[in-house]
Amino acid sequence: MVKPAPHAWLVTNRWLHWDKFEWQFAELIRAASRIGVQLERVSTDEALANLHTCGMDLPRVALIMDKDVAAVAQLDAAGVRTINSAAAIAACDNKAYTHAVLSAAGIAHPQTCTAPLTYRNLGSEEWAASAFVGAVENELGYPAVAKRAVGSWGQGMELVRGREELIAFLHAAYPAPVIVEEYIARSHGRDARIYMVGREPVAAMRRFGADGDFRANITGGGRAEPWDPPAEYVDTARAAMGALGLHVGAVDFLDAQRPLVGEVNSNAQFASLSEATGVDVASRVVRLLSQELDA
């Protein structure tokens, strides 16, 4: 009798379409097939519907390529081994949470002020009189980097150069949570990324912003080149992955004189990374998936 292939889910979002993601998903499925793993693409809505109706067998392991924390939490509760877990995704998806976790672990990252929950869109005078704006000005100064705490691809972030710009950002962002980080001038339009699978660095690149943009995102028109990260950067990436509970993810570093973590991504796209470095990232990811299926 032929033994059936190990079965796992690739969980994606039906309503998020991008050519780099589609390439990535296809590469993951092909890489899984090469090592005898049946990786079935399932949307988050299909996964949730299945949990309610029991219409299909649940897998032992699911590779999560979306940020739907609620959906992943349901899979966690049903006993599916998720890579990554709902708790890990939540800690990465909200930059205020990420800041808290990195701070508790003693991992260097930009000094950060977190805006409070306000329940309504405050007036300019109210924000100007707030302890939060006072902390930004006293601890960080201007310019500073204002970010919606939940966001991707460099969207929802601005370089604010004074109180009026900061308050305008807060008004426009409401009701989204906001953080403000110190501006690292040396890293203007420059950063670096290490893609980690388990405790091992798989590939790394430096990124450069387009046309003077302070952000270095490829999605914003930036460019990338291969990078051989020094050991202290790899060690910091391992520490960040461990603190956040990630098994697969990307750790971004600002261009500073020491390893300074900018952000950590639980489901970063790796198409640009594979293109820049020539590394078959998909094969490394599904190798970890296979190990989890065999565990």
Image: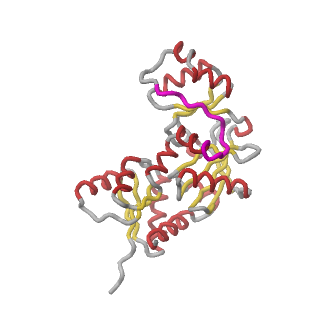
In-front residue for pair 178/81: 81
Q: Quadrant of residue 113?
A: top right
What residue sits 44% from the left and 28% below the top? 175
Q: Position of residue 20 (x, y in %)?
A: 50, 53
Q: Quadrant of residue 194?
A: bottom right
Queried whether the magenta region covers residue 116, the answer comes back as: yes
What residue sits 27% from the left and 53% below the top? 49
Q: Position of residue 235 (x, y in %)?
A: 68, 56
In-front residue for pair 208/113: 113
Queried whether the magenta region covers residue 75, the answer comes back as: no
Say left or right for 232 vs 163.
right
What range of the chain is rendered magenta? Answer: 103-117
Say left or right for 250 vs 66.
right
Asked whether residue 142 is in view, the answer is: no
Task: Report the coloring of the rendering.
Answer: secondary structure
Give the residue furthest to the bottom. 1
What residue sits 63% from the left and 61% below the top? 201
Asked whether residue 100 is in view, the answer is: yes
Q: Position of residue 101 (x, y in %)?
A: 57, 44
